Amino acid sequence: MENQDKNHTDEPIPKNHFTPNSRYFTILVYALAFVLGAILIYIFIGHFNVTLRLIGQIAHLLSPFITGAFIAFVLYPLVHLLYRDVFTKRFKMAVRPAKMLSILVSYLLAIGIITVLLVFIIPQIYESLSDLTQLLPVWYNNAVAFLEQFEETHTALSFIDYNVLNEKIYSALPKIVDYLTGIMTNILPVIVSASMAIVKGVLNFVIAIIVSVYMISDHKIIFYHFKRLMYTIMPKQTADTTRSILRESGNIFSSFIIGKAIDSLIIGIICFVCTTIFRFPYAVLLSVIVGITNIIPYFGPYMGGVIGGVVILIVSPVKVIFWAILILIIQQFDGLYLGPKILGEKTGLRPLWVIFSITVGGSLFGVVGMFLGVPCVAVLSYILNLAIEHFLKKKNIYITPYDNTDEM
């Protein structure tokens, strides 16, 4: 009997019997994923317009949640600051009421800032633009008279073609006047249509506010479920690396956006105080221009200075020189002290890469691209640096860090 059992167990396995192999199964999964990805890329490229339209429809459908996530992303640092340093540490409140009060105060502050912008600043900007539109014909006539007098008194300058110069001026300045006049005459219909759009989208905005409140309140639960899903799909080491990258990317974006907004707000206030003290015309309009353009690194301050200089040139050409000096002082203060104090080295980018990100982002997505190009390139630089360090470590190669000195 023992011999029969022994002979039975020693029978060879048939050749057509399937033996599971985890290695081949993994290869099969990766092959299927590659084929599926190639098909999706082909569909995306081959039907690009349809894909963009589909993405637009999905984004429109999810717009309340996308807007709510952006609001939560912007307001969470303020909520966390109030919760940690004010209501918990200073007032010794319990967790739940401290959280509720932190969210409430943060949203009230945000609504207050928006109300100030709508009620006080925008009407003054409109009034300034109306005054400039009325002053443009006078400035135009003075400029033409000055050029005619210059031509009469400097006929010996043969290298200047006055006919071409006059033709350019006579054709350009009326177009500018008509363009600005058209803006001012059409601004009320634009405001009405925008108001109707706001009324139509008020439901989505209310939903976005509610979504943002729940995202801030339940962010730990959301991160917990996302973490579970990520570790379910990915290997542990990959999930750990992904979490680290996402955390650092979020820190880069939030630090840059919030820090740059605070920096630009302070610069706008300083500009308003200085323009009011030195009696520059249209102090509110100039301060808003400087504050908004200051959001764009490097090029923004110069853009704001040039636009403000054109506005002052129309009203008081003599003050343009003092305006240039004022802008130079403010921007030096921002670049040497205020900016580094608020932003520090959040992006970790050298000036060359900052200029590259602004140029490429601006050419692709306009002003928004110029602003968001810096943190996007900073995130890509961070991920690329991690990949390079990983492959160098696998090859057992160590490269001495560069000496950050001014020596050649």
Image (spheres, helix red, strand yellow):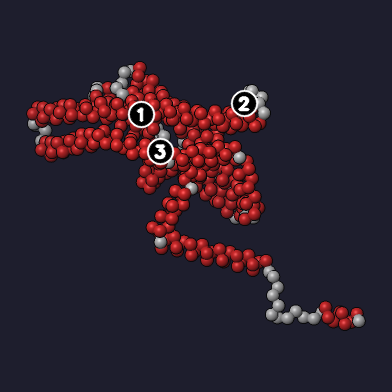
- Give the label on residue 122, or none: 1
Q: Secondary structure at mark 2?
A: helix
Say which residue appears at 54% left-offset and 43% top-offset: 249
Q: Position of residue 40 (x, y in %)?
A: 48, 62
* C-alpha separation, residue under disc 2 versus residue under disc 1: 34 Å
Residue extending farthest to the right is 1
Q: Amino acid at mark 2?
A: Phe
User: Within 10 Å of the Cα at label 3, are there few (<14), some (14-19), or many (20+) other Cα atoms?
Assistant: few
Q: Residue 68, relative to residue 318: is it above or below?
A: below
Q: Position of residue 206 (x, y in %)?
A: 49, 38
Q: Is residue 399 visible?
A: no
The residue carrying mark 2 is 87
Q: Residue 229, relative to residue 355: is it above or below?
A: below
Q: Nearer the viewer, residue 215 or 281?
A: 215
Q: Is residue 77 visible?
A: yes
* C-alpha separation, residue under disc 2 versus residue under disc 3: 36 Å
User: Within 10 Å of the Cα at label 1, are there few (<14), some (14-19), or many (20+) other Cα atoms?
Assistant: some
Q: Which marked residue is nearer to the observer: mark 2 or mark 3?
A: 3
Mark nearer the N terminus (2 vs 1) = 2
Q: Amino acid at mark 1?
A: Ile
Q: Residue 17, relative to residue 256: is it above or below?
A: below
